[in-house]
Image: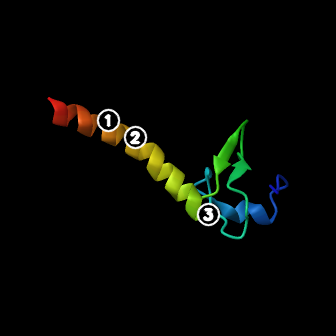
């Protein structure tokens, strides 16, 4: 669960916006500021999802360049 009081969860944020806590089983956690959710990059699945999101445009550009 997120700790909005600035307690122990405060040290789990890198550069103010990247949440990294391998002990937290949640993949998505509430953002530190504002509305929404962010991924817990302490979980391996968080990195897999990020790489998948980044791979899609790279593959599209590669296929378009290969077809031409």
- Left or right of residue 1: residue 26: left
Which comes before the other along the chain, label 3 or label 1? Answer: 3
Residue closest to the far right: 5
- Which element carries disc 3, helix, strand or loop? loop
Residue wearing tag 2: 56
Quadrant hosting residue 18: bottom right
* Label ID, residue 43: 3
- Left or right of residue 17: residue 67: left
Name the residue located 66 percent from the left edge and 69 percent from the top edge: 22
Q: Residues within 10 Å of mark 2 (few under 14, many from 20)?
A: few
Q: Position of residue 11 (x, y in %)?
A: 69, 65
Q: CB under 8 Å between callouts 1 and 2? A: yes
14 in relation to 67, above or below: below
Image quadrant holding the N terminus, namely bottom right
Image quadrant holding the C terminus, namely top left
Single out the mark in the foreground, 3 or 1. Answer: 1
- Which element carries disc 2, helix, strand or loop? helix
Single out the mark in the foreground, 2 or 3. Answer: 2
Q: Residues within 10 Å of mark 1 (few under 14, many from 20)?
A: few
Quadrant hosting residue 42: bottom right
- Which element carries disc 1, helix, strand or loop? helix
Name the residue located 70 percent from the left edge and 45 percent from the top edge: 31
Q: Position of residue 53 (x, y in %)?
A: 47, 44
* Label ID, residue 60: 1
Q: Residues within 10 Å of mark 3 (few under 14, many from 20)?
A: some
Q: Give the colour scheme of this rendering.
A: rainbow
Marks 2 and 3, how far apart in space?
Answer: 21 Å
Q: Position of residue 50 (x, y in %)?
A: 50, 50
Marks 1 and 2, how far apart in space?
Answer: 6 Å
Nearer to me, 63 or 42: 63
Which comes before the other along the chain, label 2 or label 3? Answer: 3
Nearer to me, 34 or 61: 61
């Amino acid at each position: 669960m997120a700790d909005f009081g600035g307690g122990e969860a405060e040290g789990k944020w890198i550069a103010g916006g990247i949440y990294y806590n391998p002990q937290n089983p949640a993949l998505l956690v509430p953002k530190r500021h504002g509305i929404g959710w962010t991924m817990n990059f302490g979980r391996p699945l968080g990195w897999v999802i990020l790489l998948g999101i980044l791979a899609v445009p790279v593959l599209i550009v590669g296929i378009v360049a290969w077809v031409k």
